[in-house]
Image (tube, helix red, strand yellow):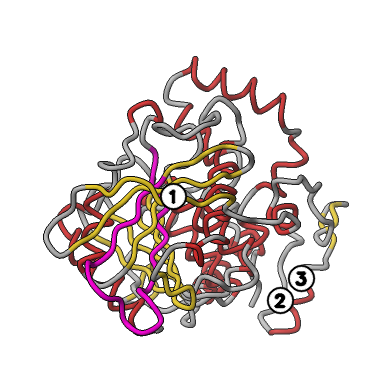
Amino acid sequence: MPICKDCVRRKCCGRQAGLFPIELGEWSFMNIHKSGRLRIFIAAVSFCIFFAGCREGESLSVSESSVLSAEAETDAGESRDSSPVSHPLSVPGMRERNYSAVDLTLLNVLPAEEGLYAREFSYVSDGYKVYGLIERPKGSPPEGGWPVILLAHGHIPPEYYSTADNYRLVSRYYAKGGFLVVKPDYRGHGRSEGQSEMTASWIFDYTIDTLNLLAGLAEIPDADTGNVFLYGHSMGGEVALRMLMVDQKQRIKAATLWAGMSEDFPENIMYFVGRRPESRELFQSRLDKEFTPDQYESLSLSPYMDSVNVPILIHHGTADESVPFEWSVSLTHWLDYVGADYRFYEYPGEDHNISGSFYHVMDTDMEFFRSLM
């Protein structure tokens, strides 16, 4: 029984012909809620049984040894085991960096709901002063401190961003559930120093800012650094994924991704800026100045999916008009292929913020995190 290797990458006939989802009895790619231990990779096998001719010369028998050996095959003169041209902002390049939240300082106490405590903080990341929010239950912490949720927020125009207001609904609800929530603004947002979206590398910059904060969590009073969890929404979903790939010390126990960006670079950005031709041209000019096309693969997520070694939840509404629902489906294909531990929750008819099931999703997250403590 042959299998097309590109089916796993979603780059063969099935994607191009619009043949997904593939029905497997009562199952389909579009309605499976499950652990990553039940592999959709089997679906790719079934797909290619019927469409084995999609790419002649790239089929292999379905056995563990043949699947492994396929990675070393050469196809049409192209080496399958050749490494992408690396870049300092690639996952391997970012692993070589040293991370620290320099001069982390607690600032003003902010108004908070009854039973909660909130205040601003600042730290220095890559030479830029970055602000953020801490929100937690009021009163004495449990032994060891409050478990931490590091919050990687989604896209908000940086000039309109507010430390005290944006994503406060999220931080407040997690804090009510007994967590200490830490939300960095990212450079260039609100009062934070530095450029935000004036370069083509901003998604990497935001990841660095959040990794620096991760390294400094021990400086936050009553933070239980033995129980650190990660939340990423939209753009923050990609920040979270990159963090999981870079942080091989496993300081993060688990993560939840809400409607996360996960497409490869630079399509992850081009998809959004491409809606306006002038924006696409501006981003392309910045892209050409900072990177070369042969570096794109090393700057993408997919080559490093096997570095995701903590359990994750993936949430996505099918009616999301901001980040395509299909991106999360594609992410599950990759996670299945590498055997990652995840659960995928689909919300029919829900929007980018999963508004109709918002609190239910947050309850699901907290139950999941508590089960790992």
Q: Are marks 3 and 2 in contact (CB under 8 Å)?
A: yes
Q: Amino acid at mark 3?
A: Ala
- Residue 141 forms part of the magenta stretch: yes
Q: Which residue is mark 3?
A: 70
Residue 155 point in image, percent of width and height: 39, 39
- Of circles 2 and 1, the one toward us is 1
Per the rendered image, the range of residues in magenta is 132-155
Q: Amino acid at mark 1?
A: Gly
Check residue 67 in the rendering and tell me which mark sits there, or answer none. 2
In the rendered image, the quadrant that contains the N terminus is bottom right
- Residue 197 forms part of the magenta stretch: no
Q: Which residue is mark 1?
A: 236
Q: Residue at x 57, y 77 (%)?
A: 339
Q: Choose between 345 and 211: the one closer to the eye.
A: 211
Residue 174, picture quadrant:
bottom left
Q: Residue at x 53, y 72 (%)?
A: 336
Question: Helix, strand or loop at disc 1?
Answer: helix
Q: Residues within 10 Å of mark 3 (few under 14, many from 20)?
A: some
Q: Is residue 4 above or below residue 273?
A: below
Q: Is residue 294 above or below residue 250?
A: above
Q: Earlier in the sequence, mark 2 or mark 1?
A: 2
Question: Helix, strand or loop at disc 3?
Answer: helix
Direction from residue 312 to residue 248 in the image, left or right: right
Q: Is residue 119 above or below residue 47?
A: above
Q: Choose between 226 and 156: the one closer to the eye.
A: 226
Residue 101 point in image, percent of width and height: 57, 53
How far apart are the two marked residues, 1 and 3, measured between alpha carbons? 34 Å
Residue 123 point in image, percent of width and height: 51, 47
On the question of residue 259 being in view, the answer is yes
On the question of residue 23 being in view, the answer is no
Q: Amino acid at mark 2?
A: Val
- Of circles 1 and 3, the one toward us is 1
